[in-house]
Image: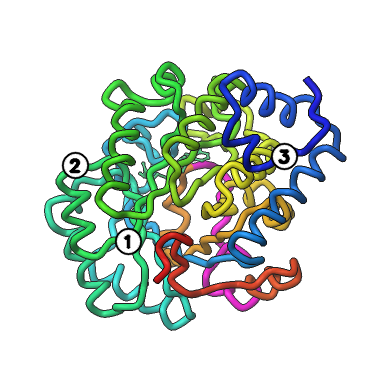
Amino acid sequence: MRFEEVPCESTMLCADKIEMKALINFYLNEASKEDKDKLYSAARHIRDVNDGPRVFLRGLIEFSSFCRNDCFYCGLCSTNRNAVRYRMSAQEILETIEEGYKLGFRSFVLQSGEDPYYFSGRLTEIVSESKRQFPNIAVTLSVGVLDPVLYLELFRAGADRFLLRHETADENHFAKLHDASQHFSLRKESLESMKQIGYQIGAGFMVGSPFQNVDTLTEDFLFLRSLAPHMVGMGPFRPHQDTIFSRFPQGSAEDTLVLTALCRLMLPKVMLPVTTALASCDIKYRTDAFRAGANVMMPCLTPQKYRDSYAIYDGKLSSLSEAAENVVQIKAQILTEGLRAEMSRGDHFDFRD
Ligand code: SAH
């Protein structure tokens, strides 16, 4: 099928499953460079008219590399004996937030493996203490699937947002990527319940993960459309040498740009990060992602001594232009794209005043 017109918001909102699949298939497999350029241009236009030509910066703190799960794609998986495991104490995390605060960050993402060490009160304490010390920051958690009562407890402690990529909305595909204890339905229920509680929620998936195809991507888009999350994280799959997917090819950066743009058209106000996985393929893709409608960047604030140990895939960029200490250069680069760098809390449009 050819598409003479670039899809607009209503095309994306009204498309049934067959139309959505045709659209995704066209842009991934048939579109010319010119078709794609038109798509990117439409996506950045939608971003700019809905929420301004700006990029929201968030400081990323990877505070634990321990994980109870065995996600077959991830270098932190529980079965990887070569993984270097570390945990940051509450004090270290608060000091890192303070460092980011001094650099100007007012939005922080606390990410880790799924590490039960923090679940019996420690994480709640860290969240409430960070909010007590720095009342004007936003705290995003990205710590995996939790006991449902914890979502409420952490929200009450002051957590504003929760990132939990659904990874794939196709149950069969999900089972090929994860150990038997994990299910797509659990992630879906978690996301729905967090939205209900009042979190700004983030879903997402890897592009080019093993066994992904146009059908599974169609399910992803239909799922994202019905969930309407406030953020969507999409980055290319990158193999890690100590996982069973070590020999699978890297996901395509160009496909990531196409799917980013389609997502922007479908959810005009959504927060769409340029992921580190994309920038790790080649730094030039960061600029391309901004041109395809992305509007968030999460520079790494993790203390230097831990950075290499948070190895979810090989060749992960955590220095230079992905490092929070280089925020001045990062802002300058954003400016050269005609965009403004925002270091405020950076709430989703629906959560502002
Ligand atoms: N434990 C948390 C955070 C996981 S890391 C959670 O489960 O939500 C954050 C994201 O990195 C994952 O959701 C996954 O989509 C992505 N990721 C993991 N391994 C990857 C790989 N090999 N290549 C690219 N992205 C990967």
Q: Which residue is pictured at 51% across the width and 46% down the height? A: 233
**Residue 294 at x, y = what percent?**
62, 54
Can residue 275 be spotted in the picture?
Answer: yes
| Viewer-nearest of discs 1 and 3 | 1
Q: Which residue is mark 1?
A: 160
- Sequence-wise, which precedes: disc 1 or disc 3? 1
Apparent side of residue 311 relative to residue 17 in the rendered image (left or right): left
Q: Which residue is mark 2?
A: 148
Question: In which quadrant of this rendering is ligand 1 seen?
Answer: top left
Q: Residue furthest bottom?
A: 102
Magenta residues, start to end: 313-329
Q: Which of the 4 image quarters holds residue 110?
A: bottom left
Q: Check residue 141 in the rendering and tell me which mark sits there, or answer none.
A: none
**Other residues around mark 2 within 10 Å, as few (<14) / some (14–19) / many (≥20):** few
**In the image, what residue type sits under mark 2?**
Pro
Quadrant position of the N terminus in the picture: top right
* Cα–Cα span, label 2 and label 1: 16 Å
- Sequence-wise, which precedes: disc 2 or disc 3? 2
Q: Which residue is mark 3?
A: 254
**Residue 250 at x, y = what percent?**
63, 33
Dot 3: what SS?
Answer: helix
* Cα–Cα span, label 2 and label 3: 37 Å
* Cα–Cα span, label 1 and label 3: 32 Å
**Other residues around mark 1 within 10 Å, as few (<14) / some (14–19) / many (≥20):** many
